Amino acid sequence: NDGRNDDDDDDDESNYDDDEYEEDAIPMSSEAIMDGFRKPATACAVDRSGIRCAAGSSDGVVRLYDFTGMKRDLQAFRTLTPREGYPVHAIDWSPSGDQFVVA
């Protein structure tokens, strides 16, 4: 015995029940293109409540979006540049959702 479970030999079987997978999947029923960046967006994070999104770009600009207050023009409610001339590589929200960090 090589220590493997014989039940794991079938590569075609999924470990997820189809119904369970659909429940946990990210909804893909609609999309939005949020313009405004002069250079490509390089980082994006949605807070735990799913209400706000922070997106950063290679030109160092971070845009904050509020999904509950967003109008049809999909404009950010706040734009900031944490460090002039440095690209945004990562963004993450605090567990409480009241702060975020940019790297």
Image (cartoon, grey):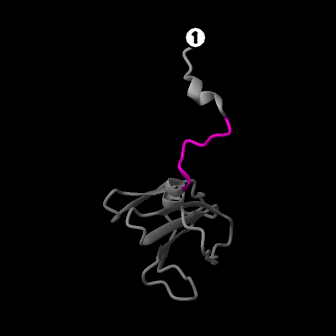
Looking at the rendered structure, the kind of residue marked 1 is Asn
On whether residue 72 falls in the magenta region, the answer is no
The part of the chain drawn in magenta is 11-18
Residue 17, horizontal then vertical, whole percent: 53, 49
Q: Is residue 64 above or below residue 71?
A: above
Q: Is residue 37 above or below residue 20?
A: below
* Front-lying residue, 65 or 62: 65
| Residue at 58 percent of width and 23 percent of height | 6
Q: Quadrant of residue 11?
A: top right
Q: How many marks?
A: 1
| Most common SS among magenta residues | loop
Task: Point out the residue furthest to the left here.
Answer: 96
| Residue at 68 percent of width and 72 percent of height | 38
Residue 52, horizontal then vertical, whole percent: 44, 71
On whether residue 17 falls in the magenta region, the answer is yes
- On screen, residue 86 versus residue 12, left or right, reads left
| Mark 1, secondary structure of its residue | loop
Q: Quadrant of the N terminus?
A: top right
Residue 83, horizontal then vertical, whole percent: 52, 61
Task: Point out the residue furthest to the bottom here.
Answer: 72
* Front-lying residue, 23 or 13: 13
Q: Quadrant of residue 86?
A: bottom right
- On screen, residue 15 versus residue 99, left or right, reads right
| Residue at 49 percent of width and 60 percent of height | 23
Residue under numbered circle 1: 1
For the residue carrying disc 1, how many other residues have a C-alpha within 10 Å: few (<14), some (14-19), or many (20+)?
few
| Residue at 55 percent of width and 67 percent of height | 27
